Image (tube, rainbow, N blue to C red):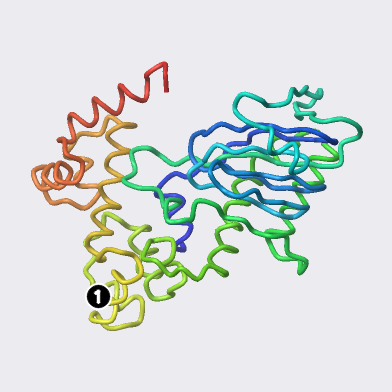
């Protein structure tokens, strides 16, 4: 498994299909802060979007906007309508027979796919937090992967056929991967994070090995050998680009996995400890409590209570 796949699988990042908007003229819609990361792909026409406390952005066909913190934001047909769109003032809409949200006046000439991405709350952190508050990816004219997928989305939005909702739900996940690829190719911040580490072939190889076999007793020397560098080189490069040592990354990966198993399975502590690479329940419990602040048994009870709460 490659490092990006490992990150997505480790944190169980999933796309959730939201509104499919078909809009004419003179419309504005306020989108409240929601779970995960908000996402908009414009397949035709023009839309103005203003994330809360930020300058407005104009998106045209082919553009994609990702709001990793899912900030509240306004969407509108033009700057004038955008200025009057607030939590207290959002224009009305209707639904087409296929569930498409119809807004504005006159024929629909703007189509937008709205979605959001969530990650498993048992994880220690989401790699999406490494992204800036606003990620705007302009449409590409060279037939790149992101542009091609946006065009596929456009066809499903404007000419829905049987199964279109299933197709769009799958494309939402594809869009995230391609948006991350595109952002990584153009981002110049270089801050340390597992996401930025994907651009380093040596470190990303080590990360993918850990993600594929977190229960294995990896040493820095073994990881370095598999990545084709010396132990000293990996020991220097890994924390510089990831923000933590290989051992710390392995431990966090194991404990995230154990947290999910505690919540979702009836495996004993002995079974979980053995499966994720600990030699004893004592060693596992000590590491878990140090990282999470509570023993694994109490975490199991608490996480299951939260998961079954009617307010979740």
Name the residue rendered at 80%, 35% in the picture. Answer: 22
Q: Quick one: 152 or 276, which is closer to the camera?
A: 152
Residue 50: x %, y % from top left: 63, 44
* Position of residue 116 in the picture relative to residue 11 (left or right): right
Q: Is residue 177 above or below residue 47?
A: below
Q: Quick one: 164 or 104, which is closer to the camera?
A: 104
Q: Residues within 10 Å of mark 1 (few under 14, many from 20)?
A: some
Q: Which residue is mark 1?
A: 235
Q: Is residue 45 above or below residue 262?
A: below
Name the residue rendered at 75%, 46% in the picture. Answer: 153
Q: Residue furthest top?
A: 310
Residue 284: x %, y % from top left: 15, 45
Name the residue rendered at 33%, 58% in the picture. Answer: 213
Residue 27: x %, y % from top left: 77, 33
* Position of residue 177 in the picture relative to residue 69 (left or right): right
Residue 199: x %, y % from top left: 47, 71
Q: Residue furthest right?
A: 107
* Position of residue 71 in the picture relative to residue 20 (left or right): left
Which quadrant of the rendered structure holds the C terminus? top left
Count of numbered circles in the view: 1
Name the residue rendered at 76%, 30% in the picture. Answer: 100
Instruction: Name which quarter of the figure residue 90 lies in.
Output: top right
Instruction: Name which quarter of the figure residue 87 lies in.
Output: top right
* Position of residue 235 in the picture relative to residue 286 (left or right): right
Which quadrant of the rendered structure holds the N terminus? bottom left
Q: Quick one: 264 or 95, which is closer to the camera?
A: 95
Q: Quick one: 75 or 178, which is closer to the camera?
A: 75
Q: Is residue 54 above or below residue 191?
A: above
SS assignment at label 1: helix
């Amino acid at each position: 498994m490659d490092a990006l796949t490992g990150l997505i699988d480790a944190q169980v990042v999933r796309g959730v299909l939201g509104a499919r908007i078909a809009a004419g003229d003179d419309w504005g819609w306020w989108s409240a802060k929601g779970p995960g990361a908000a996402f908009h792909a414009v397949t035709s026409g023009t839309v103005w979007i203003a994330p809360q406390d930020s300058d407005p952005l104009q998106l045209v066909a082919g553009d994609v906007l990702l709001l990793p913190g899912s900030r509240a934001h306004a969407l509108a047909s033009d700057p004038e309508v955008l200025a009057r769109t607030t939590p207290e003032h959002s224009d009305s809409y209707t639904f087409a027979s296929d569930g498409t949200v119809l807004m504005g006046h006159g024929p629909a000439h703007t189509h937008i796919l709205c979605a959001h991405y969530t990650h498993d709350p048992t994880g220690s952190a989401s790699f999406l937090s490494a992204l800036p508050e606003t990620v705007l990816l302009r449409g590409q004219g060279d037939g790149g992967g992101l542009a091609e997928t946006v065009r596929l989305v456009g066809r499903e939005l404007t000419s829905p056929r049987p199964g279109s909702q299933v197709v769009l739900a799958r494309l939402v996940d594809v869009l995230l991967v391609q948006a991350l690829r595109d952002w990584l190719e153009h981002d110049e911040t270089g801050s340390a994070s597992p996401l930025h580490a994907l651009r380093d072939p040596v470190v990303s190889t080590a990360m993918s090995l850990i993600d594929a076999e977190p229960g294995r007793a990896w040493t820095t020397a073994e990881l370095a050998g598999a990545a084709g560098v010396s132990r000293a080189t990996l020991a220097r490069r890994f924390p510089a680009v990831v923000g933590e040592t290989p051992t710390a990354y392995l431990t966090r990966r194991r404990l995230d996995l154990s947290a999910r198993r505690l919540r979702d399975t009836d495996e004993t502590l002995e079974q979980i400890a053995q499966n994720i690479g600990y030699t004893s329940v004592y060693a596992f419990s000590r590491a878990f409590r140090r990282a999470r602040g509570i023993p694994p048994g109490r975490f199991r009870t608490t996480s299951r209570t939260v998961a079954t709460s009617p307010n979740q």
